[in-house]
Each structure stands twice: as C-alpha cells, then as structure tokens.
Amino acid sequence: MQTLLKNTRAYKLLAADGKNDRFGHAYLVLLDDARNLRAALKTFAKPFFGCEERRGESAARIADLIDSESFADCHFFPEKDKKLVVEDAERIAEECMLRPVEGEKKLFVVCGFDEATVAAQNKLLKLLEEPPKGVFFLLGACVSYPVLPTVLSRVQKLEIPPFDNLEIAACLAREYGADFSQTDYALCAAASGGCLGSARDMLFGGAYKTLIDDAFSLCLGGSASLPALVKRVGETKRKKELLSLLRLVFRDALVYKTSAAKADRTFLRAEEARIKSVAERYTARALIEAQTLIAQAERESFFNAVFPQCLETLIAKIYEIDA
C-alpha cells in the first residue's frame, strides 16, 4: 500500500512541503477506501516528522511508533471503528495547548472525517483555521461532500484518484505471492474500481468471480430477460465494482473489435472468449456510448438512486443503441 501511495501526486505534494519546511496547518486526504484509509494516513503522517524513509535508528523508531499509533507527538482520532464526536474535538482542543514532547511539531490525525458529526466539525473550525504554533492537522475522508464547506475552505485537499488496475494487481501479487494466481490478482484488480481494499476483500471472498459472471450476463443478455436478471443482480452490495466491471467489459470489447494487438491491450485477458462475444454483439458506436452511459449511472448510484432501477435503465439504453 505504501508503494502505491508514495507514487501519487498527493503524497509527493505533501512530501515536497516537508522538504521545503512549508507545511500547511491542515490537510484533507481523500481516499475512497475505508478499509485502508487509517493506514494511508500513517504513511502521510511520517513526512511531518522526517521519518518517511526510515533513515537512521531515530527515524525508524518514530515510524514504528506512528504505525502503532503510540508516538507522543502524533495523535490519532477517533478510536478505531468509532466516529468523531464533540468529546473528541474537545480532547483535541485541550491537547493542542500542550507543547510537543520530542520535537517542535504536534500532529493530529483524524480518520473518517466524512463521518464526523456536524457538531464535532464545527468544534474544530477555529483550530483548523488558526492552530497553535507547531500544531498541524491531517484529516482523512473517503468522500468530501459530507465535510462542511467551512472546513473545506480551511484545509488543503490531497485527493488520491483510483489506482490503476495494473498497480493494484502488482500490489496484491507482492502481498500474497503464490497464494493466488496472477489471473486472480488481475481479475480482482479489474473488479475493484481502483480501490485496493475492495480488491483484497474480493480476493479472499471470491466475490469477483460472481461479479464478472454478472457483468457478462448483463452485456450478453436480452431485453426479455433483463428484468429478471436485474432482480437477481441488482441487490449486490458491490454496486461500484459491478459498474466498474461493466465499463471494463465494454472497453475491452471495443479494443478487441478495433485493435490488431488485442491480447496486449485488454484488461480482462482471462475472459477473451466472452469479450469476443460482446465485441461481436455490439457496434463500435454502442461500445463507445456505453462508457458515457455507465459514467452517468455511476453518478446516479453515488447519490443514492435505487440501484436495480438505475442498472436496468443503463443496460436497456445500451441494448437500444444498435436497435
């Protein structure tokens, strides 16, 4: 995970601020991966104390203490699996008044800020705008829309985009080695929507196999069978991943239909036979327009549209392009 994070523009911007001794007083790290957000914030916390490279005994000690959430000058809130509440904000305000123990900086790391209560966010507003000397804030959230506009105006946003499928597959291979096949890693990465946490969950739960079958069933089905298919598929808890897979299936089908070097340019290489079937069913125009329609469905799904209805409308529109 650290390798993926350190290659992002967000991390490089923060590290550059550290090297130039110009840290902002508050940052908001946006990573749409609830499972790995807290670990990611630990990676982003280390540049504040010059221990990101673990060079020397002292740096290695501080890095280890940050990882275990026990470094005296780096405070993590809230407790794991809890939401930030007013009492936490009050504790932060009190702790801000105390001098750092080991150096000149004190960092407050707040995970899941998008789940913090409105009262807790408001309680921290003044501190985020004008913290005491040497005090810094590193907030973490999966999405920004639940964060108050007044908070957003007081922080520097560090947005981490979805990771590339090849990057996720390589990360899984490094972590789990020969426990799974390269095909498993590639398919989980493809189904993850750029989220490492989702890829890990699907790898161990085998969910990616069902999702891939469902995606191809939707692409290769017909109008008559669509309502029954959506009734079965539409209740999935992995809405984002299913839409990401649909995007990849149509993308790979377009590559297969228009490119001479098919095998070198497709993501779902283990599914060549079914990709070929999708390519043969649709025109290039339909495969291209499907990308726009899926993007629209992703936005609608994000804002709490009824997913089965959203999915049925999406697939019906794609079927109709070549009708």
Image (tube, rainbow, N blue to C red):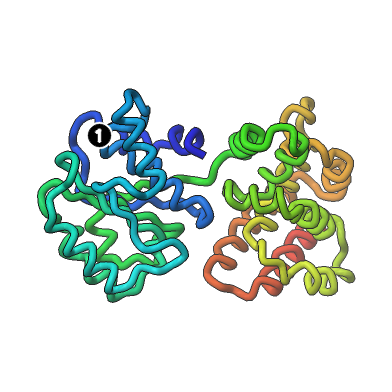
- Residue at horizontal 84 percent and vertical 38 percent from the top: 272
**Image vertical order of residue 79 relative to residue 66, above or below:** below
At a point 50% along the width and 54% down the height, the residue shown is: 32
The secondary element bearing badge 1 is classed as: helix
Towards the viewer: 146 or 126: 126
Q: Classify residue 296 by image quadrant.
A: bottom right
Q: Is residue 48 left or right of residue 29?
A: left
Q: Position of residue 227 (x, y in %)?
A: 82, 74
Residue at 35%, 68% (x, y): give it.
84
- Give residue 251's position: percent from left, percent from top: 71, 43
Front residue of 26/103: it is: 103
Residue 130 seen from this side: no
Q: Quadrant of the C terminus?
A: bottom right
Residue hosting label 1: 18
- Residue depicted at x 33% and y 72%: 85
* Residue that protrudes farthest toward the top in the picture: 56
Please tell me how crowded label 1 is: few (under 14), some (14-19), or many (20+) other residues with Cα within 10 Å: some
Residue 168 in the figure: left or right of residue 49: right
